[in-house]
Every structure is written in structure tokens, then in C-alpha cells.
Image (cartoon, rainbow, N blue to C red):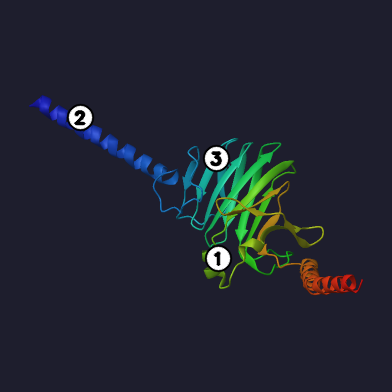
Amino acid sequence: MRKSHTTKRSKLIAFGITLLIAAYIAPLCIAYGGPCNCPEIPGGIPSNAVQCNKTDTTPVCETEQIKAGELALFYYRNMTMLMNCTQNCALVVTVDPDVTPKILGLSIDPNQTMMLTMNMYCSPLQGEMAMERTLNFYLGIEPNATSQLNAQIRLHINQTVLNQELNREVNASRLTWMYWNRTGLEWVPVYSYMDQNGYLTCNTNHFSTWTIAEIAPTKNSASTQWNWTTYAVMGAVVAPIAVALIVAIIRRR
């Protein structure tokens, strides 16, 4: 009888320990790579990505650590980011709660360990000129120290969603990344291209405030197009006349 009582007590203790372990591990699983209501990542999630799931959090000075060579995937309420850095990087993230959900990619190759402050907001900061036909988001990326780096910034473009959010037709072929030039006090367009997974991508060797806007055709390109069209029409009209004149001259001879 005593032996049976001891066995039951041991089982209860073991069950209690199991519950404590589960209670401790469950939140960690949810916060780091556990099941969540996460957006689908265009191109799929790399198998080596370390996931941090915080879909119930709108980050405000949220601090993350990215190990050198590690691919990190951060899920927040209104921003998903796939990031990697060739050096250890401390990241402090703030996202305006009014920013509509974005899927961002950031790859950095600096010459030293670094700390980055990243802010995503709907309107330009004081001193920055508002751009026309933007996607209503601005991305400030500031390192804590001057360093040499090469980086790639990517934003997934879903044209159907953008048309609904902005209440206008977005011409994806005219979208380009732009950064704020603090010396010239102007937005500078950077060569951008759409990759195979629908990310508008640009390469840079510095960080600043970035945005994406639709760039209208320049007057020069419109003028060039008009000139070529004019030449084509003139050629179509003049060529038959010239041929007729040549034939007439030959016949007279």
C-alpha cells in the first residue's frame, strides 16, 4: 500500500514537472519560430532562417540581435523582414502603427560590427520633402557609426493590394527606390529592378531615409519618343514620293 502511494506521488511530481517545462517552453516557441498567423513569404522561407514571431507586436524600439552570417526572419504586426548581415548587428526597430503591412528584405555587408536604428513611418520627417505618388511609407536606416558597407534593400510589391490601399492605379514599372540627400535637400532616385519574387530591389553603399515612388517619364524621354514618332511618319510619307520621283526621272531618260 505504501509502495503504491509512493508510485502515485512520483507520477504526480513527474506530471507537475512536465507542465512546468511546457509552460516555460510554449511562450518561447511562439516567440521564436513557433506557429503564428504569419504572412506568406514570396519565394518561400529559407531553411536556415531563424524566425522570430511577434505578430501581436507593433515594434517600438524593439531590439533584435543578428549574428554574423545568420539569416533572420522577423514577424511583426505590420512589418515582416528577412535580414542578414556579414557582421554581428544589433537592430533597434520602430514601426508606425499606421503603416500598412510590408514585407521587407535587407542584406548588409559592413566592414565592422554595427548597430542599426530602423524607423518605418507614413510621412517624411521634419526637414524631408514630401514626395508625390509614393507608397505612403518612409524607411529610415541609421548606423551608430560611420562604416563602409554594401547593402541591398527589397520591398515586396503586390500591385492589387497597393491599388486598394492608395485608391489609385499603381504603375509598377515606374516604381523606384529613392533616398533623401541631406546635402542637396532632395530625393535621389536609385536604379531599381523587380526580382523574380516580386521584390523591388536596389543596391546601395550608404544608409539614409528611403522611400519608393512612381517616377513619371522625363520631358527628354517624351521628346525623344515624339521625335522618333515624327521621323517614322515623315519617312512613311516621304519614301513613296522619293521613289515616284526616281521612277519618273528614269522613264524620261
The residue drawn where x is 68% and y is 70% is 132
Element class at badge 2? helix
Residue 71: which disc?
Answer: 3
Q: CA distance from mark 2 to mark 3?
A: 44 Å
Element class at badge 3? strand
Q: CA distance from mark 1 to mark 2?
A: 60 Å
Describe residue 249's horizontal placement relative to residue 32 as left or right: right
Question: Mark 1 or mark 2, which is nearer to you?
Answer: 1
CB atoms of marks 3 and 1 within 8 Å: no
Q: Amino acid at mark 3?
A: Leu
Q: Nearer the viewer, residue 25 or 33?
A: 33
Q: How packed is label 2: few (under 14 Cα within 10 Å), some, or many (20 or more)?
A: few
Q: CA distance from mark 3 to mark 1?
A: 28 Å
Residue picked out by circle 1: 162
Residue picked out by circle 2: 10
Element class at badge 1? helix
Q: Is residue 61 above or below residue 241?
A: above
Q: How packed is label 1: few (under 14 Cα within 10 Å), some, or many (20 or more)?
A: some
Q: Nearer the viewer, residue 130 or 223?
A: 223
Describe residue 167's horizontal placement relative to residue 149 as left or right: left
